[in-house]
Image (cartoon, grey):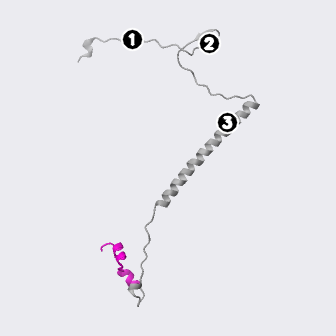
Amino acid sequence: MQLPDEQFSAGHIPTELYQRCPPGTDPKSIVLVQEAPRSYKGPILLTLVITAGTVLVLLVIAFVVQIIAASIIAVLSASCGLSYTFSRAKRGSSSARVVKGRSRSRRRAPVRSRPVRPRSRNRK
C-alpha cells in the first residue's frame, strides 16, 4: 500500500488527519470522503452542442437571406420590369456570334516553330 488511494480504501487514516481529530474520537468511527475525479464528458458535450447549434443557426440565416433576396427580385421584376439573369459564356468553335450580317469567330494565335539547333551544340 504505497499510494494514498490504496490506504484510504484499506481504511487507514493518514497521520495528518488523525492528529486533527478531537481528543477521545474513536478512529473506527471516522469516515473519509474523497472527491470524485473531474469528468470532462459534460464540458466536451456542451462545446459540441454549442458548435453544432451555431452552425445550424448560420445555415438557417443563410437560407432565409437567400429566400428573402429571391422574393425581392421576384417582386421587383413583376412590378418594375427589372430583371436579373445569370448567363454563362459559351465556349467552343460552334458558338459564333452574328454581328450585322457577319459571323465573328475567335482568332487563334499563329503557331511559331522553334528554331532547330545543330546536334553538335546539344552534346556535351
The mark lying in front, picked from 1 and 2, is: 2
Instruction: For mark 3, give the secondary structure.
Output: helix
Tell me the mark number nearer the camera, choosing from 1 and 3. 3
Q: How far apart in space, not on screen, are marks 1 and 2 (Cα)? A: 33 Å
Query: Which residue is at the front of the view, 41 or 108?
Result: 41
> In the rendered image of this protein, does residue 92 appear above or below residue 48?
above
Q: Residue furthest right?
A: 79
Residue visible at 53% across and 51% down in the picture? 51
The circle on residue 70 is 3
Q: Quadrant of the N terminus?
A: bottom left
Residue at coordinates 63% horizontally, 12% vertically from top-left? Answer: 99
**Measured from the top left, where is residue 43 in percent x and y?**
49, 59
Element at label 2: strand
**Rendered position, 30 above or below 111:** below
Of mark 1 and mark 2, the one earlier in the sequence is 2
- The amino acid on which the numbered mark 1 sits, given as a three-letter code, is Ser
Give the alpha-carbon distance from disc 1 to disc 3, as whole Å: 54 Å
Residue 55 against residue 107 in the figure, above or below: below
Image marks 1 and 3: residues in contact by CB distance under 8 Å: no
Three-letter amino acid code of the residue under disc 3? Ala
- Location of residue 121 (image quadrant): top left
- Residue that carries the numbered disc 1 in the rendered image: 113
**Residue on which the image places disc 2:** 98
Q: Secondary structure beneath disc 1? A: loop
Q: Looking at the image, which residue sits at the far left?
A: 124
Q: Is residue 22 rendered to the left or right of residue 124?
A: right
Q: Which residues are magenta?
A: 1-20
